[in-house]
Amino acid sequence: MNYKKFEIKNKIVFETPIDNYPPLVTLTSKHSTCKISLHGAHILSFKPNDKKDLLWLSSLAIYRQDKAIRGGIPICLPWFGGFDTPSHGFARISSWEIIESKNFDDEFLSITFRLKNDKFIADYYVEISTTLNIELKVKNISEDKFEFTQALHSYFNISDVKNTIIKGLENQNYIDSIDNNREKTQQGYIRIDKEIDRIYTNTNSQTLILDKGYKREIIISTKNSKSTVVWNPWIEKSSKMSDFDEGGYKKMLCIESANIGFEKIILQKGESHSLKVKISEKEISI
Ligand code: TA6
């Protein structure tokens, strides 16, 4: 595919740093920089100017066509989890094409990726300014209904998991994936001192990560995401993953904007669904 026609001088630039692997595109706006691999349309980094990257990326990530990149924002589609193989669906290990790139008066930059097969067309719109705005639109192009689950499986960059508090999920029901999928209710804010893997259901539109170490709050605002997954593998599980930095569990936290389990999406022929996520940060005085 000819990516050059989507380049915008000094603002949207493609490179192929790894042989036999899809290109990397770098968006450099007035307010921020974003790096995206065409392998899985995988956002690797979003860094507002003069701030720390909002996303965590393992330095041991494996850049191979059959492997998902560890960190950033993997796209889990058309299923979440081990429903089928590959785990979390094939979208995050597929090569996506590009259908559009835009510069809005230097204030906003956007790029749109597409993954198409006989059942659905997925368009992934990524826009950067001071914030990262994402839309994952899925259209059923088959003759029958199409059911799918999805997650933007975002790995956030934090100072230390012990210094962070997750707000916005108080009193929400969740399925505890590491306690026999028992249904529980969240009591108060979430503090993490061991492995956590929870699927919150019927979730609100905003989750916050309060990071005392980096003196910032990461704000994850969503539209049409009914499920929110909170995941940190902690010591033992992360040590068993060859693509996970040693001690990396302290520096990352997954807050995943999703529609999974009984909150799956069902599209009739010709129908579409749009999942939107806005990621931003604000300084806090501690
Ligand atoms: O979102 C949480 C989760 O489903 C965990 O159970 C863990 O499997 C994680 O995703 C990472 O999965 P991956 O296939 O990317 O290693």
Image (cartoon, rainbow, N blue to C red):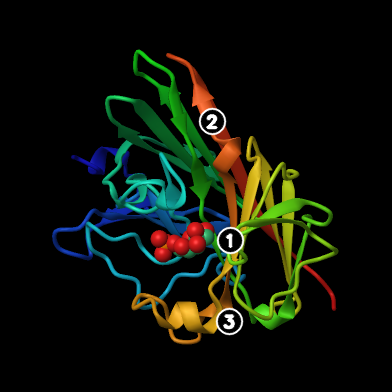
The kind of secondary structure element at disc 3 is helix
Viewer-side residue, 195 vs 98: 195
Task: Name the residue type under label 3.
Answer: Lys
Q: Looking at the image, is mark 3 or mark 1 earlier in the sequence?
A: 1
- Separation of marks 2 and 3 at Cα, in angstroms: 33 Å
Task: Measure how far apart labels 2 and 1 are at the Cα level.
Answer: 21 Å
Q: Amino acid at mark 2?
A: Ile
Task: Tell me the residue that label 2 is attached to.
Answer: 265
Locate residue 91 relative to residue 255 in the image: left or right: left
Of residues 105 and 237, the one drawn nearer to the viewer in this rendering: 237
How crowded pointer 3 is (Cα within 10 Å; few <14, some 14-19, many 20+) is rated as many
Which label is found at residue 250? 3
Hey, what amino acid is under mark 1? Ser
Secondary structure beneath label 1? loop
Labelled disc at residue 116: none
Q: Residues under labels 3 and 1: Cα distance? A: 20 Å
Q: Is residue 79 left or right of residue 104?
A: left
Which of the pair 267/103 is nearer the observer?
267
Residue that mark 1 sits on: 177
Of marks 3 and 1, the one in the foreground? 1
